[in-house]
Image (tube, rainbow, N blue to C red):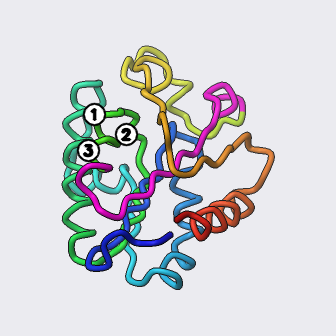
Amino acid sequence: MKKKNKNKGILFWVTGLSGSGKTVIAEKIKKNIIKDYGPTLLVSGDDLRQIFKFNKYTAKERMVLGKYYCNFAKFITNQKINLIFAVVSMTNSTRNWNRRNIDNYLEIYIKTDIKAIIKAKKKKIYHKKNSGDIVGIDIKPELPINPDIIIYNNFKKTTLTLSKELIKKIRSTK
């Protein structure tokens, strides 16, 4: 990836449904991102929820949290630190804000069918009854319209293989 602004870090916004493999793939690319682009922080949406004790999941509350995520990402990248952010954040307004406000933004979509996630039993949340706040079940996600990179995860390839595909695509992105 070529930086638009060399005085700022890169935001690698890794998005997808819960259970799609975002965080595991993000963890596997971190060493390569550090090697290629310098100081890098890895954060997941779950990390920030835990740090700030934000445990509400309604659509409205998710929108508020999405704004916090964006501002946090801008704060980090403005300090010349790259950020790999693995987060559901399935709203167009969040991703559009990032494109407008973060100079070095790379949107990575881990595309997975929710039926495949359920079948693979990747997340227990999809098997809970009457929770009412699950993106993809109760809350309709706004899937990325034009992500910079798409990684298809049908759970037939290992996350290591998918992370190698992602690094190759990142390096070829201009």
Asked if 88 appears above or below 12 in the picture, the reply is above
Q: Are marks 2 and 1 in contact (CB under 8 Å)?
A: yes
**Would residue 65 be found to the left or right of residue 174 on screen?**
left
Residue tagged 3: 97
Q: Earlier in the sequence, mark 3 or mark 2?
A: 2
Residue 166 vs residue 64: left or right?
A: right
Look at the image and say whether residue 145 sits in the magenta stretch.
no
Residue 42, x across and y down, in percent: 41, 67
The amino acid on which the numbered mark 3 sits, given as a three-letter code, is: Trp
Over which residues does the magenta segment extend? 99-119
Q: Quick one: SS at disc 2?
A: loop
Do the residues bearing badges 3 and 2 touch, measured as CB atoms within 8 Å?
no
Residue type, mark 1 in image: Arg
Q: Is residue 110 magenta?
A: yes
Residue that mark 2 sits on:
89
Q: Residue at x 61, y 28 (%)?
A: 114
Q: Residues within 10 Å of mark 2 (few under 14, many from 20)?
A: many
Task: Identify the amino acid type marked 2.
Answer: Ser
- Work out whether mark 1 precedes mark 3 in sequence or the reverse, and give the earlier one: 1
- Element on which disc 3 rests: helix
Q: CA distance from mark 1 to mark 3?
A: 15 Å
Place of residue 19 in the rendered image (x, y in percent of width and height, measured from the top left): 56, 41
Q: Residue at x 26, y 39 (%)?
A: 55
* Quadrant of the image occupied by residue 172: bottom right
| Residue farthest top in this picture | 130
Label 3 vs label 2: CA separation?
12 Å
Q: Which of the labelled discs sits on residue 62, or is there none?
A: 1
Q: Residue furthest right?
A: 156
Q: Give coordinates of residue 50: x percent, y percent.
A: 29, 52
Say which element carries label 1: helix
